[in-house]
Amino acid sequence: MKKFVSLILSAVVCFSATALPVSAVDFQEIQSVSVKNDSSEVLEYVMANRSEIWIAGMTAEAENIVIPEYVDGLPVVGIESYSFGNSEYSSSIKSVVIPKTVKYIGEGAFSYCQNIESLTISDGVEHIGGFAFVGCSKLKSVTIPKSVRKIDDMAFNGCDSIEEFVIESPDCDIYCMEYTIYSGTYGDSVIAGYDNSSAQKYAEIYNKKFKSLGTCPTDFYISDFEYPYKKLLIELMYQDSNSYMEYWIYDIDKDNVPELITKTGTSESDYIIKFYKYKDNKVLLIDSMSGGHTTFYKDKDNKQLCCMYGHMRYGVITWLSSDGNSISVDKTVETVGYDEENNVYKWSDYGNFETLESSYAFFISYPDGWSNELDMSLISNYKLISDNQISAVIIPSDKVGNVNGDDMIDANDASVILSTYVLLSTGENFVLSNEQCNTADVNGDGLVDANDASAILGYYSYLSTLPSTETPVDIKEYITK
């Protein structure tokens, strides 16, 4: 039997998936989960495709709805249509926080939740469905983060108390209807957005007051150039095993193509910073420099990248620029003062700086696998496929899922699969045996993929919470439930 072994790398850690409208996913079970920050708050959730969670509503009164990022190790990627809007407890809600894992806010999700006063939509949400917040009449301010690509019709109609509606996404697709955003009609309420953005165009079309946020910033998210940089990050993290990595995205040469900046090493004495450019369908190393005790900031006044070095009360600021082929130093200050009382460097004496958002990654050398601190979000869609011939092997039911042969089914079995694909990404030999491949194919579909990894961790969670008085079912039976 031939099996094509494939794995989305992030599946083992965060099981990221593309958010789809509710009708397009295969919901398999409904459960309830208590939200940690408020013991009285209970949310109902739906597991979809055995790899992701959608919030389905609430089962008790709660003032503060804080959607969790993960439930039982699976990411919360969506909020179902009319999940809170149709709830008998909707009038109790006063605040809502939606995390970065959520991609889709369903149609009417919070419709006519009339007592919501505070709404936080985290950067990561991509689609706000029609009527999602219709009739939330006590909302006074809303900020739509850069990640949001689409706002559907009537999404904020009837939000009559909004004083400022901020749209940080310059090219957000706002449904062309006057009542999509019911703002800018009452008193001094305004729509705020960047110059020449879709927010400004929307405000102008429907005669709503517009407030400029200035020119569109030149910083980018890695999703804009995701595949080349993701592949490089995987390779770097493997090559620099047992090392620290921090990485940033910034358009240094202001040509609308961001550069990737990495900082790697094993200790402060050997950190090195490298600058990569995506050009002609290739990722090119354009420059490098030493990087001990450094981090990056944006000089907000001149929109320039700055490298800041601080150690033992000695601080240095370096302003950097690029012509696309190398990095140049435009100015350096080596006399940054130090505030002894508050134990901080006096960076602000030399400019208006803002921290450049970074991500961290740690790699523990094979075969121990990835550490829990690894940010896998940047490589969530990287996929490797091997066409190795796998012979048919009959695996006893009590061995299915026990990939590493330690007679336990747990996260370590999923890590073995992930480690294999880290090796494959660098051209190393295939390390899973025929028996291991068949053991890893827990759902029996002829593939070792994200679904198997999800099932292994789901089964491990089930075993961990099973009362001692109950006899566990095997993983095959667990999957078919």
Image (cartoon, rainbow, N blue to C red):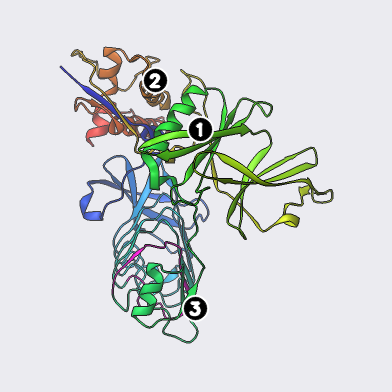
Question: In front: 118, or 40?
Answer: 118
Q: Answer whether residue 146 is magenta in the image.
A: no
Residue at disc 2, secondary structure: helix
Q: Which residues are magenta?
A: 155-176
Name the residue beneath numbered marker 1.
372
Rendered image quadrant of residue 329: top right
Question: In front: 338, or 84?
Answer: 338
Q: Position of residue 38 (x, y in %)?
A: 51, 56
- Judged from this view, the residue extending furthest toward the bottom is 187
Q: Horizontally, is 118 left or right of 71 in the view?
A: right
Q: Residues within 10 Å of mark 2 (few under 14, many from 20)?
A: some
Rendered image quadrant of residue 451: top left
Mark 1 / mark 3, whichever is N-terminal: 3
Is residue 373 among what the camera can see? Answer: no
Q: Nearer the viewer, mark 1 or mark 3?
A: 3
Residue at disc 1, secondary structure: loop
